[in-house]
């Protein structure tokens, strides 16, 4: 049974106000959402990846424990931040893997076609992260929208709420960001070929 949104928001606010036990009460409530995000990420990873979805959730939990006192808006914001942490963990592992494999063919990660962010099915998470970092330098809101949608799994409506923009603005930004990233990733692909 899903916990009411107001219960999650209350726990997030309590945690923001310094109640460390609020995180311990929150995690069991949002664990399935976190695990769903982690499974989504891990499905896109290379087959020989040593990290499992559960371990990724636990790593995010450990990072949350040591994080500075957060200021949470709501469940969607919390999940977006957790998704961003998962992305950072996997990108860091991907970069380390590429460093070990330098000079050989690095396996490419297949991104979910439904979001159509990548230029093709062979875009990898490190390339997407590099492109997203470049987008953030040009337009931080569009980069954050991509993070919320692609990495956080939020709907356009939920992402618009987190960003405090209209749904129409979020849809327009989403179309522009996808096109921009597609172009950047195609450049990356031609450089790597």
Image (cartoon, grey):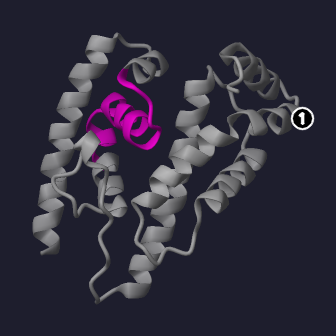
Asked if residue 136 is among those painted magenta in the image, a careful observer would answer yes
Quadrant assignment, res 117? top left
Give above or below for 32 relative to 73.
below
Please report the bounds of the magenta region as a residue range.
Answer: 134-156
Q: Is residue 69 visible?
A: no
User: In which quadrant of the rendered image does the N terminus lie?
Assistant: top right
Q: Position of residue 182 (x, y in %)?
A: 16, 47
Quadrant assignment, res 143? top left
Determine the residue positioned at 88% across, 29% down: 19
Residue highlighted by disc 1 = 21
User: In which quadrant of the rendered image does the C terminus lie?
Assistant: bottom left
Determine the residue positioned at 31% across, 54% down: 111
Quadrant assignment, res 166? top left
Q: Position of residue 162 (x, y in %)?
A: 48, 21
Q: Is residue 178 visible?
A: yes
Magenta region, main secondary structure = helix
Give above or below for 134 relative to 52.
above
Asked if residue 171 is among those painted magenta in the image, a careful observer would answer no
State left or right for residue 134 relative to residue 95: left
Q: Between 144 and 83, which is closer to the camera in this rendering?
A: 83
Determine the residue positioned at 48% across, 60% down: 42
């Amino acid at each position: 049974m899903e916990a009411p949104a107001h219960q999650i928001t209350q726990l997030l606010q309590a945690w923001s106000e310094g109640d460390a036990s609020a995180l311990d009460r929150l995690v069991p409530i949002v664990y399935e959402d976190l695990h769903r995000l982690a499974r989504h990420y891990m499905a896109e990873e290379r087959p020989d990846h040593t990290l499992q979805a559960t371990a990724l959730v636990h790593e995010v939990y450990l990072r949350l424990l040591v994080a500075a006192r957060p200021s949470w808006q709501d469940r969607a914001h919390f999940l977006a931040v957790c998704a961003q942490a998962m992305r950072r963990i996997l990108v860091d592992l991907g970069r380390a893997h590429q460093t070990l494999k330098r000079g050989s063919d690095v396996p490419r990660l297949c991104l979910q076609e439904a979001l159509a962010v990548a230029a093709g099915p062979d875009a990898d998470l490190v390339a997407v992260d590099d492109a997203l970092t470049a987008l953030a330098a040009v337009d931080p809101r569009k980069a954050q929208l991509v993070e919320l949608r692609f990495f956080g799994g939020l709907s356009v409506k939920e992402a618009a709420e987190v960003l405090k923009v209209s749904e129409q603005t979020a849809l327009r930004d989403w179309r522009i960001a996808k096109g921009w990233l597609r172009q950047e990733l195609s450049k990356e692909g031609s450089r790597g070929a």
